[in-house]
Image: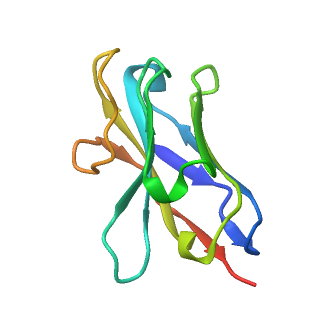
Amino acid sequence: QLVESGGGLVQPGGSLRLSCAASGFSLDYYTIGWFRQAPGKEREGVSCMGRSGGNTNYTDSVKGRFTISRDNAKNTMYLQMNSLKPEDTATYYCAAWGTTFQAPCVLRWRPYDYWGQGTQVTVSS
């Protein structure tokens, strides 16, 4: 089970930190990812990180603004979002995908095994 927290309403230019706690399995063995879906749009891969932590990927629109991280000791993943824009408004989902240690992460949603329930992020003045 994955449980997200940290969403909310923020003004343009502001920051939020999303957290996603895993239970029932160890994130050590999983590639992690963050996805988002805005009303009327397809689910979009935002960022991912491989098991080793050395492989990360970001969609172009968030590069330089968002940072993905993981704390395996706490079995938790994070998404730090800075310089938020109205177009970042969406429901954000965390996900985990069982892979080999060196496998590169991907921003496609289909291979991910576990999903959180989603947390709403609204960027508006």
* Residue 44 percent location from the top left of the image: 36, 61
| Horizontal and vertical percent position of residue 111 | 23, 42
Q: Single out the residue that lies furthest toward the left.
A: 110
In the picture shown, does residue 73 fall above or below 40?
A: above
Counting from the top left corner in percent of width and height, residue 79 is at 60, 46
Position of the C terminus by quadrant:
bottom right
> In the image, is 95 to the left or to the right of 16?
left
Q: To which quarter of the image does residue 102 belong?
A: top left
Q: Tell whether 111 sits left or right of 76.
A: left
Q: Is residue 19 visible?
A: no
Query: Is 11 drawn above or below residue 54 in the view shown?
Result: below
Considering depth in this image, is 57 or 49 the residue closer to the camera?
Answer: 57
- Residue at horizontal 50 percent and vertical 61 percent from the top: 92
Q: Residue at x 44, y 75 (%)?
A: 38
Residue 91 seen anywhere in this rendered image of the structure: yes
Q: Can you say which quadrant of the picture contains the N terminus?
A: top left
Locate residue 64 relative to residue 48 in the image: left or right. Answer: right
